[in-house]
Image (cartoon, grey):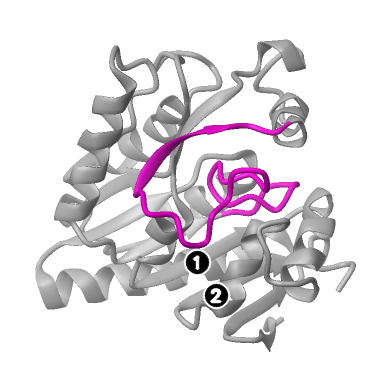
Amino acid sequence: MSAKTFSADALTVCVHDSAEQLADAAATAAREILLDSVRTRGRAFAILASAASQEKFLAALTAMPDLPWSKIILFHMDEYLGISREHPASFRRFLRERVEEKVKPHAFHYLEGDAAEPLKEIARYAGLLKAHPVDLCCLGIGENGHIAFNDPPVADFHDPHIVKLAQLDEKCRRQQVGEGQFPNLAAVPQYAYTLTIPALCAARKMICIVPERRKAEAVRETICGPIATACPASILRKMSHATLHLDSASACLL
């Protein structure tokens, strides 16, 4: 069945019957954006998210036919401070196993969570993003409404930075426990590197992938609440270049 589509201010919202249909539709849209960028500029630059909610989408995207991965350069949007690339919860490991090892992109630039000098790592990654304007940002929404690790207490719609260190709020850290990445709250790092909200929104196109019932409250606040940092994802309603893909479970409170 076709998705139900409507607008929330400038944001296009598509509601699909299932998480599988959501993933296929979002991957098809991402494929077209990447192909267009390769055709017109010879390369495509994209940011990917790391979360359980992104797994079906990433599987569908890496299975898309005819994507010239050798001409696609990838970034990710966040990583825990102090964590190694082999830690089970590492976002580098998540994307290496689900994307890089499967499709062999031209390059995958990672935030090194355990870099010896965090401020130098921030400057290095910000420099890469400045040098390579992003064609596509594929993101999710956290249970507290965050995008990347811009939790409500630290979210800034006018952040002057591209990358920063952010303190994670408790609801965000509890989500990481609930997703099985850490055994308990104490094991979850309290800080993480994150791309800022302006850095995410600077992409030429944005595709937001949000399945599952546990995201329904955050989706309702994103679509129906005020545009405010209390729900950082609400800024998407000002982004005419963004599309939010939901399934029937995540959209159930709309």
Front one among 47 and 67: 47
Query: Could you tell whether 19 is left or right of 192 in the image?
Result: right
Image location of residue 56, percent across then percent down:
58, 50
Other-residue count near label 1 (Cα within 10 Å), few / some / many at <14 / 14–19 / ≥20: many
Any mark on residue 207, and which? 1
Magenta region, main secondary structure: loop
- Residue kind at label 2, given as amino acid type: Thr
**From what the image shows, is residue 44 above or below residue 25?**
above
SS at circle 2: strand
Image location of residue 49, percent across then percent down:
48, 46
Q: Is residue 210 in sight in this rendering?
A: no
Query: Residue visible at 32% across and 37% down?
Result: 100
Q: Is residue 6 in sight in this rendering?
A: yes
Dot 1 and dot 2 residues touching (CB under 8 Å): yes
What span is colored magenta in the figure? 140-169
Query: Could you tell whether 209 is left or right of 199 in the image?
Result: right
Residue, disc 2 = 243
**From what the image shows, is residue 31 above or below residue 122?**
below
Image location of residue 227, percent across then percent down:
68, 71
- Residue kind at label 1, given as amino acid type: Ile
